Amino acid sequence: VKEAGGAGVEVAAAGANPQFLEIEERLNAIEERIEFVDAEIAQRVGRKVGRDIGILYGLVAGLIVFMMLLVLLPKLLGYL
């Protein structure tokens, strides 16, 4: 590379150390495993939350039906 004045400019290129590349590959593999485990844990927590929400919806629906029967059934039997 030359400047406008004609003088050459040296560019230093850093060479990668093979040990550094090997360590970087190992760290990437470890990071992928950690991400996988985190995803598995999040999926299990999500399933538990989904189960709990389903139970809650079932209880609320059952309570509504029970209250409807408790209030409406005597009125329906009184008209018959």
Image (cartoon, rainbow, N blue to C red):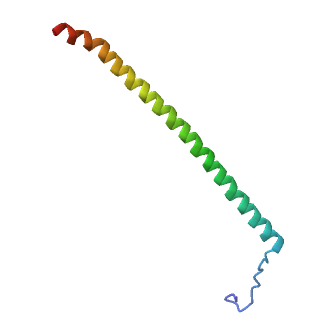
Identity of the residue drawn at 73% across and 58% down: 30
| Outermost residue toward the left in this view | 80
The quadrant the C terminus occupies is top left
Q: Which corner quadrant of the image does residue 28 belong to?
A: bottom right
| Residue at the top extreme of this rendering | 78
Residue 63 locus on image (x, y percent): 39, 20
What residue is shown at x 66% (from left), y 50% (from top)? 37
41 horizontally vs 58: left or right: right
Q: Is residue 55 above or below residue 36?
A: above
Q: Is residue 12 left or right of residue 77?
A: right
Could you tell me which quadrant the N terminus lies in? bottom right
Q: How many labels does the image show?
A: 0
Instruction: Determine the residue positioned at 72% across, 62% down.
Output: 29
Please name whichever residue, 80 or 42, is drawn nearer the observer in this view of the structure.
Answer: 80
Taking the view exactly as shown, the residue that stands out farthest to the front is 80
Left or right: where 26 falls relative to 41 = right
Residue 7: quadrant of the picture: bottom right
Q: Position of residue 45 (x, y in %)?
A: 58, 40
In the image, 66 versus 35, the foreground residue is 66
Give above or below for 12 relative to 26.
Answer: below
Q: Using the image, determine if residue 1 lies above or below residue 24.
A: below
For the point 75% across and 61% down, the residue is: 27
Relative to the observer, which residue lies in front, 5 or 55? Answer: 55
Residue 42 point in image, percent of width and height: 59, 45
